Image (cartoon, coloured by chain):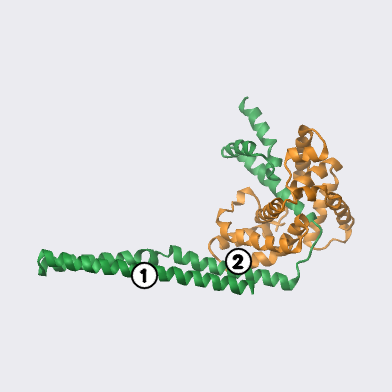
Chain colours: A green, B orange
């Protein structure tokens, strides 16, 4: 099939794509085509806007104002809980602080024992301190996770109430 | 939807993508009722429709960063999320067949379309004007084309499922959907070109 005919055939699939009723194989072909065809991308946008406009024809069904507020509060509580979890998960301070402290202490120890201590005593001290630091790190992490879980549960409980 | 409204929604979605909760609240206030109306029409269940409202805006919060304005207006993006969530529930509860075989469900929309068209002279609000424009565009289609579009959009039925339901050849159904959507796109083009 030449390119022109293929383009025409795929363009004919755009209405069904806008209604999201294409089957998997058709959709894959169309997506591959859309990557290199700005004309079809624009047409799909227009079809999608036309499809979404059909939603206006659903008979109006008012959302009770008190229910709308409840739903809004529930949504915002969920968002805040998510934000808390997200911050705990991705904060650069949280992620790197432990490593920075450990690296700093290790550096101080190494410099110190290389100047003032015999090799055996220095390594022994470093080993004990490393062991203590790792233990503290694991404990702190567990506590942090527990606190985040409790916070999330509390948010959900409040949103359902 | 004027360009000003479209730009407003686009800005809101950008702010949501940046983690602005107040923008989500504004989006919710502007769209919750319409999302609820669509979800209720598809599901015919008030509790499930409310769940869909929450899921829709939750998904908007989580995925606003993926919204691409080249693929459609912000309102289109939101409405299609709501439709997908409602259809997922419809399928999950195995009521799909019930919906499409209940006589009222596939006829009421056409009646409603006629009613909306009759209200055109009294239309004042932007929503009513848009509704009237869409109703008029749909009214201009042959009944068999309106029906396939309705089954596809509100019922989420595939080409072959529509063909089976209407006892028509698959090719005929594909052609009807293509022609119907082409006409709707052309007739609703002025909505995209309206100035602020």
Q: Would you identify the image quadrant in which residue B124 lies?
A: bottom right
B115 to the left or right of A114? right
Q: Residue at x 61, y 35 (%)?
A: A29
Q: Which residue is mark 2?
A: B23
Callout 1 crowding tier (Cα within 10 Å): few <14, some 14–19, many ≥20: few
| Camera-side residue of B192 and A41 | A41
Residue A90's tag is none
* Quadrant where the image shows the C terminus of chain B: bottom right
**How far across and down, in percent of the image, does residue A125 sit?**
18, 68
Q: Residue A28's x, y, as percent?
A: 60, 38
- A159 shown above or below B68: below
Q: Chain of mark 2?
A: B
The residue under the point 76% across, 63% down is B46
Q: Secondary structure at mark 2?
A: helix
Task: From the top left corner, tell me how far across and down residue A33 is, in percent.
Answer: 59, 36
Q: Secondary structure at mark 1?
A: helix
Percent coordinates x, y for residue B59 in the rendering: 61, 58
- Split into 4 quadrants, where in the image is the N terminus of chain B? bottom right
Q: Chain of mark 1?
A: A
Name the image quarter holding residue A111. Answer: bottom left
**Residue B173's quadrant in the figure?**
top right
The furthest residue to the top = A1
Crowd class of label 2 (few under 14; some 14 to 19; many from 20; radius 10 Å)? many
Look at mark 1 in the image and give the residue it sits on.
Answer: A139
Residue B189 in view in this figure: no
User: In percent of the image, x 59 and y 53: which residue is there?
Assistant: B67
Position above or below: A86 against B136? below
Front of the two marks 2 and 1: 1
Q: Nearer the viewer, residue B35 or B162?
A: B162
- Contact flag, marks 2 and 1 (Cβ < 8 Å): no
Labels 2 and 1 share a subunit? no
Q: Is residue B122 visible?
A: yes
């Amino acid at each position: 099939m030449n390119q022109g005919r293929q383009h025409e055939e795929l363009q004919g699939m755009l209405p069904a794509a806008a209604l999201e009723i294409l089957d998997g194989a058709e959709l894959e072909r169309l997506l591959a085509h859309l990557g290199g065809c700005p004309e079809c991308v624009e047409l799909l946008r227009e079809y999608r806007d036309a499809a979404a406009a059909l939603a206006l024809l659903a008979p109006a069904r008012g959302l009770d104002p008190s229910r709308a507020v409840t739903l809004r509060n529930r949504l915002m509580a969920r968002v805040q809980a998510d934000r808390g979890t997200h911050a705990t998960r991705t904060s650069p301070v949280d992620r790197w602080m432990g490593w920075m402290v450990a690296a700093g202490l290790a550096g101080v120890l190494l410099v110190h024992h290389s100047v003032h201590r015999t090799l055996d005593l220095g390594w022994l001290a470093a080993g004990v301190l490393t062991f203590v630091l790792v233990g503290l790190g694991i404990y702190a992490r567990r506590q942090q996770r527990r606190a985040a879980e409790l916070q999330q549960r509390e948010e959900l409980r409040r949103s359902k109430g | 939807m004027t360009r000003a409204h479209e730009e407003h929604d686009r800005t809101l979605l950008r702010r949501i993508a940046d983690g602005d909760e107040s923008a989500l609240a504004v989006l919710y206030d502007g769209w919750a009722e319409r999302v609820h109306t669509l979800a209720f029409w598809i599901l015919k269940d008030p509790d499930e429709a409310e769940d869909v409202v929450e899921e829709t805006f939750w998904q908007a919060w989580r995925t606003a960063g993926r919204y691409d304005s080249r693929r459609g207006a912000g309102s289109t993006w939101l409405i299609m999320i709501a439709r997908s969530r409602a259809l997922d529930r419809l399928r999950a509860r195995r009521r799909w067949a019930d919906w499409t075989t209940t006589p009222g469900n596939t006829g009421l929309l056409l009646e409603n379309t006629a009613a909306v068209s009759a209200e055109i002279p009294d239309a004042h609000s932007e929503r009513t004007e848009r509704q009237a424009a869409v109703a008029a565009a749909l009214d201009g289609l042959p009944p068999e084309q309106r029906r396939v579009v309705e089954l596809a959009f509100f019922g989420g039925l595939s080409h072959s499922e529509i063909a089976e339901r209407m006892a028509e050849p698959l090719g005929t159904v594909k052609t009807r959907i293509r022609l119907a959507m082409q006409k709707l796109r052309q007739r609703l083009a002025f909505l995209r070109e309206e100035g602020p």
